[in-house]
């Protein structure tokens, strides 16, 4: 009877050992691959790549952006006139192209196209394309603009070169630029100051405009009437202090 009990005790121990071995084997089969999957680096979903035999896809994570369109001209505020600029393109096709705004130094503006927004009739402000138009400044009825009021544009002041003054074979921003005024509603541009370089224009209020320019030797400051553009005062700016 004692021998039978000893036999069953050994049999139970063997069964326990076999059960433990089975559990360890199961852990090895399932757990190790899972552990490897958890510790393997993976790309973020926003940069995940999917590849097939023919195509390659990338999840960029970028959103959609709204696309808007606009005409090539800019409406002068408070008026029914639009302005488009004609600039030298420099490409191999059409050497001139209409644009909504001025571009870089190399693509100089050569003319302005005025568009009547009531009738859509249009006309060129200048004749031809033999010029370089520099900065264009909008002159308004009142400055600063009254609260909840319109600020109609009355004229454009601009620096214009219409001669090859440096004899390099073309009219560019490096040539002498005079100050011109273009009054709206069909008037032809008028030269106000024949100078070398227009360095700045600022409208002080509804009555006065300050223009600074360089005549090739000295800097000047001139006060213009914002109504009729006559010269109110013109003075030399002080030389550099010594």
Image (spheres, rainbow, N blue to C red):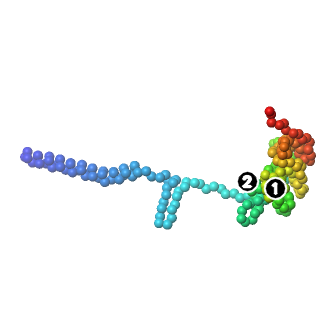
Q: Nearer the viewer, residue 222 or 137?
A: 222
- Disc 1 is placed on an element classified as loop
- Across and down, in percent, residue 90 comes to 73, 60
- The residue labelled by disc 1 is 167
Q: Position of residue 55 (x, y in %)?
A: 51, 64
Looking at this rendering, what residue extends furthest in the front direction?
167
Q: Nearer the viewer, residue 228 or 109?
A: 109
Crowding around mark 2 (Cα neighbors within 10 Å: few <14, some 14 to 19, many 20+) is few
Q: What residue sits 14% from the left and 46% below the top? A: 9
Q: Residue sitting at 49 percent across and 66 percent down?
A: 54
- Residue 158 visible (yes or no): no
Left or right placement of residue 200 versus residue 187 in this view: left
Tell me whether circle 1 and circle 2 mark residues in contact (CB < 8 Å). no
| Residue placed furthest toward the top | 242
Q: Which residue is mark 2?
A: 104
On the image, the x and y values in percent for residue 172 come to 79, 55
Q: CA distance from mark 1 to mark 2?
A: 22 Å
Reply above or below: 227 against 70: above
Identify the residue at image location x=89%, y=52%: 191
């Amino acid at each position: 009877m004692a021998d039978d009990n000893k036999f069953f005790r050994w049999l139970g121990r063997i069964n326990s050992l076999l059960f433990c071995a089975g559990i360890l084997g199961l852990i090895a089969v399932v757990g190790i691959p899972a552990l490897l999957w958890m510790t393997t680096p993976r790309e973020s979903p926003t940069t995940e790549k999917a590849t097939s035999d023919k195509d390659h896809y990338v999840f960029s994570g970028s959103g959609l952006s709204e696309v808007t369109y606009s005409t090539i001209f800019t409406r002068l505020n408070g008026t029914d006139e639009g302005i488009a600029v004609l600039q030298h393109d420099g490409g191999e096709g059409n050497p001139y192209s209409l644009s909504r705004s001025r571009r870089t130094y190399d693509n100089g503006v050569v003319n302005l196209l005025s568009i009547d927004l009531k009738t859509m009739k249009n006309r060129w402000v200048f004749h031809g394309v033999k010029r370089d138009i520099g900065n264009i400044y909008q002159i308004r009825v009142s400055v600063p603009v009254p609260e909840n009021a319109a600020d109609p544009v009355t004229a454009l002041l601009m620096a214009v070169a219409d001669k090859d003054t440096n004899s390099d074979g073309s009219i560019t921003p490096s040539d002498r630029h005079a100050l011109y005024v273009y009054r709206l509603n069909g008037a032809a541009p008028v030269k106000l100051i024949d100078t070398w370089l227009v360095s700045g224009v600022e409208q002080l209020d509804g009555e006065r405009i300050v223009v600074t320019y360089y005549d090739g030797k000295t800097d000047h400051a001139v006060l213009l009437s914002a109504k009729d553009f006559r010269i109110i005062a013109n003075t030399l700016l002080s030389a550099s202090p010594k």
